[in-house]
Image: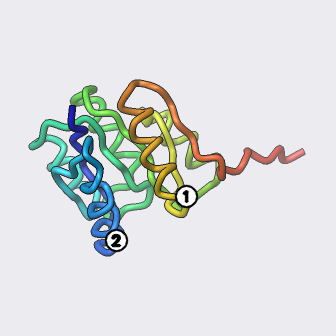
Amino acid sequence: MTIRILLADDSQQYRSVIRTMLDREPDMMVVAEASDGPAALQQARAQTLDLVLMDVDMPQMDGIEVTRRLLAEQPAPRVLALSLHPDAQFVQAMVEAGAMGYVLKDDPFPDLLSAIREVVAGRTYFSSGLRQQQDPC
């Protein structure tokens, strides 16, 4: 089975690098890309997907809202958050929106591959570099 992926990230350079690396994997194929929230929704509606790699911070509509709307419309694709933000509030917001995992953009590429495979299999995956919520007391 080939994992069909939508890569949603506002950085064209980052998308290009990740796409090239993912397309080298025999069981993965990036079938669409999006550079902002509305485009991510449009592409997700137009494709048969197994996974959406969703940047948390995108223009026009952030990845949290895109995830919420996408999964309300079609629960089939899994969502894996992709972010520079290691803070717990972003992780919590993405999970509440329906994401099954959260990976940091600076994680090693093999970790991203593991995360994709885990999430597509229906399991959760969270980067080891995530910060714990700080208690204000």
Disc 2 marks which residue? 11
Query: Residue, x 56% and y 44% (percent of image)?
Result: 91
Q: Residue at coordinates 66% horizontally, 52% vertically from top-left?
A: 129
Whole-percent x, y for residue 77 in the image: 27, 33
| Residue at position x 28%, y 72% in the image | 12
Whether residue 46 is situated above or below residue 106 in the rendered picture: above
Amino acid type, mark 2? Ser
Check disc 1: other Cα within 10 Å, few if <14, some if 14-19, many if 20+: some
Q: Quadrant of the C terminus?
A: top right
| Residue 73 position within the rendered picture, expressed as x and y whole percent measured from the top left | 22, 30
Give the residue furthest to the left.
Answer: 46
Instruction: Pick whichever, 60 or 7, lies toward us.
Output: 7
Q: State left or right for residue 126 relative to residue 37.
A: right
> Which residue is situated farthest in the right direction here?
137
Label 2, residues with CA under 10 Å away: few <14, some 14-19, many ≥20: few
Q: State the count of labels.
A: 2
Label 1 sits on a secondary structure element that is loop
Query: Which kind of residue does numbered mark 1 sit on?
Result: Asp
The coloring applied to the image is rainbow
Residue ID for mark 1 = 107
Residue 126 numbered tag: none
Q: CA distance from mark 2 to mark 1?
A: 17 Å
